[in-house]
Amino acid sequence: MCAVLADPHRAHWKSDETSTEAELRSTLDHFIAYSGRYEVDEAQGSVVHHIEIHVVPNFIGTDFKRRVSFEGSLLKLQPVEPLAGDIVEYTLTWERA
């Protein structure tokens, strides 16, 4: 699987050739990308993403476990484990095209 998530409203860099440190920081704050193998556990209603590539190198070799639910043409993924920091909860929602 491969996921690339970005804020479509993030600010453009002032230059196409180079970026400021603040612009690079903003990119990381509003962009995530990772890929790897995955396993589905239908009995538990979960999927595990085995991270092989990640924009943040520290996550390579880790697993992301998500609860899975379906609503019509929507696939919803939510973390199984509590998140660190100020994030309380989030849901990734994918719509079948």
Image: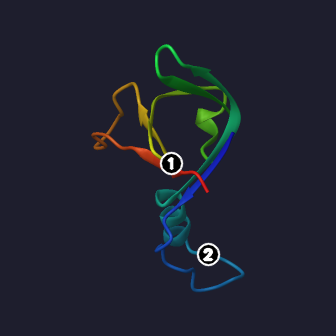
* Furthest residue in direction front, as rendered: 72
Residue 71 seen in the current view: yes
Q: Secondary structure at mark 1?
A: loop
* Furthest residue in direction bottom, as rendered: 14
Picture quarter containing residue 78? Answer: top left
Residue 53 seen in the current view: no
Say whether residue 46 is left or right of residue 51. Answer: left
Q: CA distance from mark 1 to mark 2?
A: 39 Å
Return the mark for residue 73.
Answer: 1
Q: Nearer the viewer, mark 1 or mark 2?
A: 1
Q: For the residue carrying disc 1, how many other residues have a C-alpha within 10 Å: few (<14), some (14-19), or many (20+)?
A: few
Colouring chosen for the image of the structure = rainbow
On the image, numbered disc 2 is attached to which residue? 19
Amino acid residing under circle 1: Ser
- Residues 42 and 80: in front is 42
Residue 69, position in %: x, y? 44, 34
Residue 21, position in %: x, y? 54, 68
- Residues 84 and 90: in front is 90
Amino acid residing under circle 2: Ser
- Residues 39 and 88: in front is 39
